[in-house]
Amino acid sequence: MIPERLETQRLVLRRHRRADAPRLAQLLNNWEVVRWLAQVPFPYTEKDALDWISQTGRNWVEGRDYQFVAVLKETNEVVGHIGIRMDVPRPTGELGYWFGQPYWGLGYGAEAARAMVAFGFLELKLERLWATYLPENVRSLTVLSKAGLMPDGFKSQEFSTLKRTVNCPMMAIDRAEYLQTATMAETRS
Ligand SMILES: CC(C)(COP(=O)(O)OP(=O)(O)OC[C@H]1O[C@@H](n2cnc3c(N)ncnc32)[C@H](O)[C@@H]1OP(=O)(O)O)[C@@H](O)C(=O)NCCC(=O)NCCS
């Protein structure tokens, strides 16, 4: 059974609910967030959020992707999103995430990404996890590095947001690399 709720020090990562739509629309209807994402409509409405929530619900059941909202434990506010899209039929997955602009720079991105990497390897049994980012997205590069992903060439990505295809840097981590670093961390503690 795939867990539908994960915890980090400050965050709960849980499946989307329809009641999250207004909050997702509030946080995502911001070009400073959307401009870094490949396939998000802009302006972003509550209807877009409801469509996304329905789609992610179906995809979860079908094992196509596992998307979570990030909720602050302290205040119960939804502050962002993180998830893994499966490369069916290969046992590999793509990591994707965004946080609302007021919550940037507080380490939530790295905290959630570390939890999602563990989820990918320990629960989804992935062989490899990868992500791409726009070349100027230094914040995202930092998050991916902190979660253990390493540079792995480039991948051409269609950005409907920017109406163009971009040759994006790719970062990745293999199962063996993840298990090795997890074992080393355990030995140290
Ligand atoms: C990318 C994103 C998720 C990062 O989330 P976050 O919670 O701010 O991430 P963190 O706080 O864990 O780390 C951000 C790092 O970027 C660094 N950073 C902040 N502003 C920066 C800037 N202008 N230039 C370079 N680095 C910057 C921070 O110092 C931090 O590194 P540090 O912890 O070593 O100091 C968030 O900025 C976001 O949602 N951006 C828009 C959507 C997006 O880019 N999604 C990813 C698409 S690939």
Image (cartoon, rainbow, N blue to C red):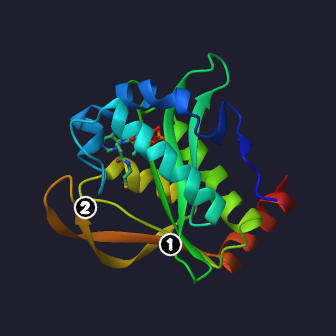
Q: Nearer the viewer, residue 128 or 27?
A: 27
Q: Residue pushed farthest left?
A: 163
Evaluate whether residue 66 shows in this view. no
- Can you tell which quarter of the image residue 29 is in? top left
Q: Amino acid at mark 2?
A: Pro
| Residue marked by disc 1 | 172
Task: Residue at 50% x, 42% y: name it.
Answer: 81
Q: Residue pushed farthest top?
A: 75
Q: Amino acid at mark 1?
A: Ala
CA distance separating discs 2 and 1: 15 Å
Does mark 1 have its CB less than 8 Å from ligand 1? no
In this rendering, the answer to whether 189 lies above or below 90 is above
Mark 2 and mark 1 residues within 8 Å of each other at the beta carbon: no
- Can you tell which quarter of the image residue 180 is in? bottom right
Task: Residue at 27% x, 59% y: name it.
Answer: 134
Crowd rating for badge 2 (residues with CA inside 10 Å; few <14, some 14–19, many 20+): some
In this rendering, the answer to whether 73 lies above or below 138 is above
Evaluate whether residue 65 shows in this view. yes
Task: Residue at 22% x, 41% y: name it.
Answer: 42
Q: Residue 161 at x, y = what percent?
A: 20, 52
Ligand 1 picture quarter: top left
| Residue marked by disc 2 | 135
Q: Earlier in the sequence, mark 2 or mark 1?
A: 2
- Can you tell which quarter of the image residue 163 is in? bottom left
Q: Residue 115 at x, y = what percent?
A: 66, 50
